[in-house]
Each structure stands twice: as structure tokens, then as C-alpha cells.
Amino acid sequence: MYSAIFSGALQGIAAYLVSVEVDIARGLPAFYMVGSLSTEVRESRERVTVALKNVGMDLPPCHITVNLSPADRKKEGTAFDLPIAVGILESLNIIPRGVTDHILFLGELGLNGELKKARGVLPIVRAAAEGGIRECIVPGANAREGAVIPGIAVRGAENIRDIIKFFMAGKEEREIVLPAVSVDMSSLFSENREGSMGPPDFREVAGQESARRGAEIAAAGFHNMLMVGPPGVGKSMIARRIPGILPPLNLEESLEVTSVVSVAGLLEEGEALITKRPFHSPHHSISQAALIGGNNVPKPGMISLAHRGVLFLDELTEFPRASLDALRQPLEDRRVNIARVSGNVTYPSNFMLVCAMNPCPCGYYPDRNRCHCTEPEVHRYMGKVSGPILDRIDLCVELQPMNYFHLKEKQNGESSEEIRKRVGRAREAQRLRFQGTKYQFNADIETTSMEKFCTLGAEEEQCMEQLYHSLCLSARSYHRILRVARTIADLEGVERIGVEHLMEASFYRPSLEYWGC
């Protein structure tokens, strides 16, 4: 007997439908699986056979052939256990034939028949809904994750026994056996945004006004930012508060972020949707594959997990130079392409890069009362950050040690909420400006579009000419100042870039003392 069951597979964070074809015939007992399968997919034979036995469904001596179509695309993961088991049950007429039409199955089976959490459920359910599938049965731990996709009924099962009962019951009773899961999207967003576990507040930061202002500009224009200063001045403290001044995720962005986390297998059990901006701060000992993504079976790296959020690299100069240089293409393209023998995958990596570093090996340069590093040691230390990476950082802020007055100051600074409102208005101005273009933020503006989006008047042209000569700017530094000035003008709510915006933007260029640029 023959049966075909719908399932799904992943390619990057995209998904495609898979037809799990099962044929049972008379002959010597055998269980064959074909269709360009990885090792863990082939191991489904043992998991499915033992799981069915332990729920009272002993397989008769027969010849079982399973084909996962399309057969020319590599299949990874353990989520094909459930559709294979259902296909066998239908082929043996244990469940009525035809009842599985237009239903997608996904899930890993334990040896006791338990359905275990699978990865990548959200993008697969989304592909199923777009492909005309009306229902989806997934592990109970993934049910809320899949239920955020409209137009498809998602049912969560804890054991394969539940699925057998579901198909053996009448149409009216099925909703009782495996009810469709629903998620209130509006309450989900409001609960997460009003929760007490949000990012720490900028109100807690004492002093460091230039760094606070730099963080606001970076958040408004999605500029990459570098903070340089001695230990203990608040670099990490400021970086961890940047997600709190970014606008909240909209639904489409939230689905993108959740899809990446789901594909990586890091979505918490029962979690439906990620509605907060990601913030990731990997240790400097992280491998290049873990940072960028990859391995033998390509998986998202930190830069993809930080998609639509912040990637904070503390102690920047301690990261291997090869790992930092590998960031160049993702920072430029806002996505990362990973090529392996098994195929090519693309993951999104539209993140805001925030870095922090000391100015020298001991950390106290140029304070010669505390720093005893030689000039060659300082330049060698700062030279660990390559020019191409520095070229992709629009703002460089130097932090100085705080004095006693700032530490004891009782008047708090602006809260993250107040800053977020200004950032939101600047982001809205950019959305309207870049409608119909390939740009989304001021940081994306290419040199060919500078004249159009960063128009300068006669007085501003004269100011830029003076800055160009007096500061010995390079071409890249010139365009960097224009991008930042465009964002500063947006924060003030004005369309035209003024002299004051250019002067402030020039303050955030990398120091000649450190890099000579």
C-alpha cells in the first residue's frame, strides 16, 4: 500500500514542502529510506520502529520503502520522524486513508512515542500556509510558535497516540482530542513590551554625555559604533542599553528574528514570538564559524542571531583578526552566504555593530601617569582592527574617566523612553525619504546617492571643504561625516543638513592619534 504525507525542510531560514512517500509491500522484512538524506534522517528508521512498537503498533513483516521528495535536495534534522510514522500507519490502514490530505506533519519521536521539540517550525509552517496546506500537526512545545502564522490551523501533540486518536475520532470530536492552538498577537506584543525584563535604562548612566549622544545617533541611523576608553568608564554599560532606545520590532521583523532563532534551535519551549530587539555579546574566544555561521551542517551564527538588533563585540582587539575581517561582507550586504559541499545557504545579518576597546594593552593611554606602553606597542595594538572594518564604522566615541562629581550627581539623565521617541521620529523620516529605493537607513546611503540624500548648501559646502583640509579627511571619512550629519539633522526634525550638524558629525570620526584616519 502507498501513502504520501506532507512535511517540510529548511534551506537557510527559508523552507520548502517535502512529500514523504511510504510504500509497504510483501517480501523480506526491510526498511529502506531514500531521497538525499543526512545521517540523522536515516536514523528515523530505528526511532519510528521502536516508537510504534512501544505504543502498541507492532509492524508486520514487510518491505517498507520511504522516499523524501524532492530527492535532489539534502534533508537534515530529525523532524521527519512523525510524517514517516503517520505514512506507515496510513499505508497499513491503521488510520483511515485520505484523512491526512492537506495536513503537514513535523516532529521528532522519542522511543516511547513522545513528540519532542523540533527546530525551524515557524518558517516551515509559513511555507505550508503559502503552499495551500490547511492544517499542521507539530510537537506541543512548538505549537504556539507555528500558531502565529495566519490562515493555517496548528495542532500540538504530545505523543503519537494523540495523533492516532485524532484520526480515529469523528470530525466533531477531533477538536477535543487535538484542539487548534491560537495566539493573541496584540497581547503578545504588549506583554513583552511592558514586561519588567526589558533592557536596562540610560537613566542609570552617569556622565559620558558624548557617548550617550553617539549611541542615540547610531540607533537613529543604524550606524555602526566604536567606543574607545580605559577600563571601567562605562563602555559595556552604554552598549547594553542601546536595544532599549531602538524602536520596537514590527510583526514582519519579529517573524524574521523568530525564524532565525527557530532554525538555530534556540527558541524556548512554548515561546510563540520574539518581540524584543536581539542583543548578543559573544566572548572574544568565539570561533569564526560560531560568529559568522557555518560548520559542516550550516547553522546561523551570532551575526544572524543578532538580526534586526545589536551585536556587541567587547574587547574588540582580542578577537582574532580573521574573525573580524569575516564581518566585512555581512556588514556590507546585510546577509551572509555560506557555501558547503552539501549546498549554499543564506542567512540574514542586518545587525547594528557596537564595539568597545581599550586604547592600548594596559588600557590607560594617553594618560602617561598610568600608561607605560611604548608608542609602537600602542599602534600595534590599535592596528589589530583592520582598515576595512574601521571603514564600516561610522561613529567612533572616546570615553574619558569620570570625575567624582559625575559619580555623586543626583540628577538623572534622560531615560531610554525619551531617547527612543526621538529615534523613532528620525526612523520615520528615513522611511519616508527612502520609499521606493533600496535604502532603509542613513547608514545604507552609498557614495553614488550622496548628492541626492545629503544635499549641502553653499555655507555647508564651505564648511565641509574646511573640514576636509584641516582634518586631512580621506574620501571615506568625508562620506562618513555626511551620513552621520544626515542622521543628526533627522534627530532634530529638519530636512536640510546644517553647519552645526556637520561639525558634530566630524567629532565622531576615528582619532588621528590612534589610527591616522
Image: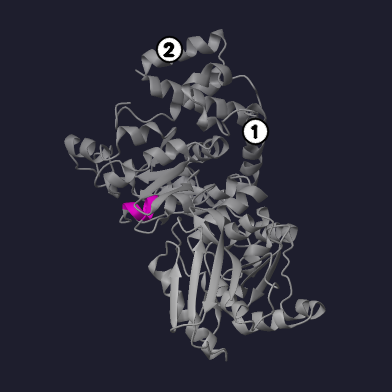
Residue 316 in view: yes
Which contiguous range is marked in magenta? 288-294
Q: Quadrant of the N terminus?
A: bottom right
Q: Say whether residue 98 is left or right of residue 64.
A: right
Residue 158 in view: no
Amino acid at the residue labelled 2: Gln
Which residue, given by chain and number where applicable, does mark 2 sit on? Answer: 466
| Position above or below: 277 against 196 | above
| Position above or below: 235 against 160 | above
The residue sitting at 56% across, 31% down in the picture is 439
Of residues 474 and 208, the one nearer the viewer is 474
Which residue, given by chain and number where applicable, does mark 1 sit on? Answer: 431
Is 292 contained in the magenta span? yes
Residue 280, how many percent across, how many down? 46, 54
Of residues 146 and 394, the one nearer the viewer is 146
Residue 190, how many percent across, how many down? 71, 58
Closer to the chain start, of discs 2 and 1, is 1
Residue 80, how many percent across, how many down? 52, 69
The residue sitting at 19% across, 39% down in the picture is 377
Q: Say which element carries label 2.
A: helix
